[in-house]
Image: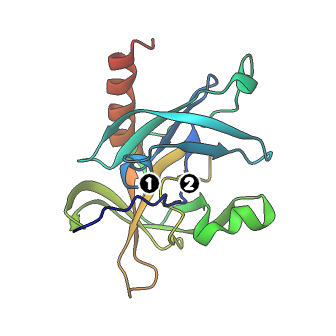
Amino acid sequence: QPQTYRQEVAGLGSGFLVSQDGYILTNDHVAGHASKIVVTLTSGEKYNAKLVGTDRTSDVALLKIEDESAKGITFPALRFANSEDIVIGEWVIAFGNPFGLFDVNAKPTITVGVVSNSGVNMVQEGRVYRGMIQTDAAISSGNSGGPLVASTGEVVGINTAVIVGAQGICFAVASNTASVVLRSEERRVGKE
């Protein structure tokens, strides 16, 4: 007789706040199939969150902090830059939680690099990515979903993919793509 076993599997990833009322962007491959989501802010607070919407094609997911202890809190949110304005060679900073290091010291890890290319189309793990930003800022397992930030402090992309075995070839979903998905999800859930 075949038997079925259920096992809870924990996953780690990164994300960032995009509104003061607790909306968070990350990658679909980070949270798109999660049954339970707990977000940890850089201040150490942990909140339950729910998946509001996800777009597998662009690999973008929208979460919302839904926790009684978060009622009335105004969260610090990042702003988007126009990813069409990025310049090859411009400095960028990748924020995230590579290999779960955030759990060890309660601070996100940052890596610095430059924009190596833009408008990159690629296929990886069954997804067709369009208009990606290439960077040599190190992005590792757990960095996915974190922000790629310009020197102005604005988000130019969402850390998403690496070419395995090729050091320094990393990719981010462009902020303009993420903005379109975000606005679409906000309309769908009735958020103005």
Name the spot of residue 170 as percent of width and height, x first: 41, 70
Q: Measure the alpha-carbon separation of dots 2 and 1.
A: 8 Å
Q: Name the residue that disc number 1 marks.
A: 30
Decide which of tag 2 and tag 1 comes sooner along the chain: 2
x 32%, y 25%: residue:
184
Q: Is residue 63 left or right of residue 75?
A: left
Q: Is the residue marked by circle 1 packed among few (<14), some (14-19), or many (20+) residues within 10 Å?
A: many
Q: Residue 118, relative to residue 54: is it above or below?
A: below
Residue 81 is tagged as: none
Which residue corresponds to the image point at 55% horizontal and 48% vertical from the top-left? 15
Residue 26 position in % (x across, y down): 47, 46
Q: Left or right: where does residue 121 sit relative to residue 76? A: left
Residue type highlighted by circle 2: Ser
Q: Residue at x 63, y 44 (%)?
A: 39
Q: What amino acid type should be assigned to the residue bearing mark 1?
A: Val
Quadrant assignment for the C terminus: top left
Q: Which mark is residue 14?
A: 2
Q: How is the image coloured?
A: rainbow
Helix, strand or loop status at disc 2: loop
Q: Residue furthest bottom?
A: 165
Residue 64 in sight here: yes
Mark 2 vs mark 1, foreground winner is: 1
In the rendering, at what x and y percent does residue 125 appear?
Answer: 24, 67
Question: Splitting the image into 4 quarters, where does residue 105 fall?
Answer: bottom right
- Residue 158 drawn above or below residue 51: below
Residue 47, placed above or below residue 33: above
Q: Position of residue 9 (x, y in %)?
A: 48, 61
* Callouts 2 and 1 close, C-beta under 8 Å: yes
